[in-house]
């Protein structure tokens, strides 16, 4: 029996799906990931969800804003991986797409979502605040 080996496209799809799940569902702190998310300073515990700012601060390397003529946010594009695979998250008010690029491979996973992690809400509030200044 021959073993089927995963391709880089399979790996890329898995990475993109993981990012999509984080954005749509939020990140629950568990025993397995507590070393990554729980510090003495943040007061978080196992069983709580990671806040949008913590996830953004740890995962986002670059940001692109798509605004309409009235300077309302239409979409935020976040680079969450680069160097090996490049992964971009495109969030709008009711959907998210995750685009992954690695060599010649391209993967897109998407979903209609409720902003479980709070990414859209965070950036939308940021744009409104900047417009009011």
Image (cartoon, rainbow, N blue to C red):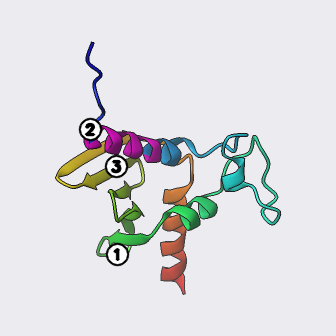
SS class, disc 2: loop
Q: Name the residue furthest front.
A: 1
Question: Do tag 1 and tag 2 residues touch (Cβ < 8 Å)?
Answer: no
Q: What residue is rendered at 48% in x and 74% in y?
A: 127
Q: Which residue is mark 2?
A: 7
**Callout 3 environment at 10 Å: few (<14), some (14 to 19), or many (20+)?**
many
Q: Which residue is mark 3?
A: 97
Figure label count:
3
Q: Which SS does the magenta portion mostly show?
A: helix
Q: Name the residue furthest top.
A: 1
Q: Which residues are magenta?
A: 8-19
> Residue 15's mark?
none
Q: Quadrant of residue 20?
A: top left
Magenta-colored stretch includes residue 9? yes
Q: What residue is rendered at 56% in x and 46% in y?
A: 116
Q: Quadrant of residue 8?
A: top left
Tell me: residue 37, above or below residue 64. above
Q: What residue is rendered at 30% in x and 33% in y?
A: 6
User: Marks 3 and 2, how far apart in space?
Assistant: 22 Å
User: Marks 1 and 2, how far apart in space?
Assistant: 44 Å
SS class, disc 3: strand
What is the x, y in percent for residue 53? 61, 64
Q: Is residue 114 visible?
A: no
> Residue 70's mark?
1
Q: Earlier in the sequence, mark 3 or mark 2?
A: 2
Mark 1 or 2: the one toward you? 2
């Amino acid at each position: 029996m021959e073993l089927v080996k995963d391709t880089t496209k399979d790996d890329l799809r898995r990475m993109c799906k993981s990012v999509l799940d984080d954005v749509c569902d939020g990140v629950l702190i568990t025993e397995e990931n507590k070393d990554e998310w729980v510090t003495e300073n943040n007061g978080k515990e196992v069983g709580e969800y990671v806040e949008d700012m913590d996830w953004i601060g740890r995962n986002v390397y670059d940001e692109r804003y798509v605004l309409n003529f009235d300077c309302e946010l239409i979409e935020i594009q976040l680079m969450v991986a680069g160097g090996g695979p490049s992964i971009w998250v495109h969030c709008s008010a009711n959907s998210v797409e995750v685009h992954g690029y690695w060599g010649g491979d391209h993967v897109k996973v998407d979903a209609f979502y409720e902003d479980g992690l709070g990414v859209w809400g965070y950036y939308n509030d940021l744009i409104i605040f900047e417009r009011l200044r």
